[in-house]
Amino acid sequence: MASAAEQLAANLNFSAFAKAEELKKRIWFTLGALLVYRLGTYIPLPGINIEALQQAFEQQSQGILGMVNMFSGGAIGRMAILALGIMPYISASIIIQLMTAVIPTLEQLKKEGEQGRKVINQYTRYLTVILAAVQSYGIAVGLEGSSSPIVADPGWFFRFTAVITLTGGTVFLMWLGEQITARGIGNGISLIIFSGIVAGLPSAIAGTLELGRQGALSTLLILAIIVLAIVVIGFIVFIERAQRRLLIQYPKRQMGNRMFQGDSSHLPLKLNTAGVIPPIFASSLLLLPITMANFSAGGPSWLTTITALLGRGQPAYLLLYAGLIAFFAFFYTAIVFNPTDTADQLKKHGGFLPGIRPGQRTAEYIDFVLTRITVAGALYLVIVCLMPELLISQAGLPFYFGGTSLLIVVSVTMDTVAQIQGHLLAHQYEGLVKKTKLRGARR
């Protein structure tokens, strides 16, 4: 027999969506905020020679700079006021989370609940401003040192305006993402990255078809790309919905003169608990030290060597990318899921795992199972993100067909749809409660 939630989910339709006024307001707010973000990626930085910039960017667009441009929604290629995108905020989040694990003060703040999280979020914002200012200055210096006359009037005034403008753009995106999360649908930061990737899909598809028309890509290869993309999307959906369920038993309870039968439930452990965070964090760390290396023609030799080693499809790039993805898969899982707290909650409510002693033994068993499935989840992320990389480096395909971009698009779409369904279910529950109260009043 289907549960009440499953029955409500089966009855979801467009009429229910039309009646959910709060949900429609949230969707319109999200679309409006993303539209503002897309408009910001077309406003150029003052003092930039756009034609010279495009010529310099075309020479480096097939390197790692192309991935930076993808995550920024094309703003790097146009050197817009939002060229830094949301990556400084993600880098700051990584640093703060790493520091939380080693600094007792931050760890104590994390345990203080909502108030502690607000303080940590404030520290993250401050660090975002610092990182954005440093990267903005690096961009300004790199643009001035380019072999092409990209900057019309080089000097300290241009550097100052570039730092203020680009840092302000990142702070605005950070605020916009928080507003989407609070007043819209879905995770604001993920949706900003998602919209930047999706905005480039039409041009990427058109470019691939044009290469096929010119004979640079064979028809068989294009069909293989389409099939591979469909298979990867299906694989992502399957793994993202996969769970390892641990059986939980609740003993018989006596309340007054009544005896309640023992119940059973499940503790769902997602195969990929970290979600899309590891590839984003890994990409952010790979892009951070060499963001402007490709713009600088006369940089130091060690920087040129690092840029060459971390080129798209190079062995060092693939190994470092895979290692960072695996590391953040375990690290983020350890942050979002605490087996000890889960075991304590089960013990508090009288639940136990069959054959496992409540308390510390339960926490150890949950940690053992979580570690095993995280190994599988990390391997899945590495395969999805690196398998298309080889195809990209060999065939010269657009970056939008990479596994990281597909993973972000599919995961963010699934998460947003799940939140929309949750709002619809809540709206239907509210309708049922109101009808029940009206019937009770009439009686």
Image: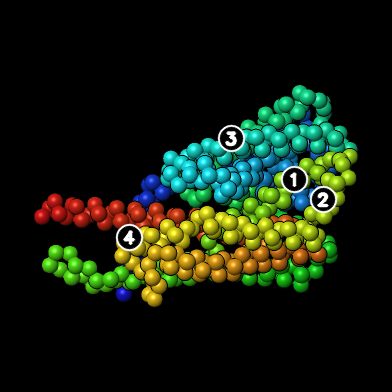
Q: CA distance from mark 4 to mark 1?
A: 47 Å
**For mark 3, what is the residue?**
126
Rate crowding at label 2 as few (under 14), some (14 to 19) or many (20 or more) other CA atoms within 10 Å.
some
Mark closer to the chain start, 1 or 2: 1
Q: CA distance from mark 1 to mark 3?
A: 20 Å
**For mark 2, what is the residue?**
306
Q: Secondary structure at mark 2?
A: helix
**Mark 1–mark 2 contact, CB under 8 Å?**
yes
Rate crowding at label 4 as few (under 14), some (14 to 19) or many (20 or more) other CA atoms within 10 Å.
few
* Residue 71 at x, y percent in the picture: 67, 49
Mark closer to the chain start, 3 or 2: 3
Q: What label does residue 329 carry, if any?
A: none
What residue sits 62% from the left and 35% below the top?
Answer: 129
Q: CA distance from mark 2 to mark 4?
A: 53 Å
Residue type at tag 1: Pro
What residue sits 24% from the left and 52% below the top?
Answer: 434
From the image, which quarter does the N terminus lie in?
bottom left
Q: Is residue 189 above or below residue 332?
A: above
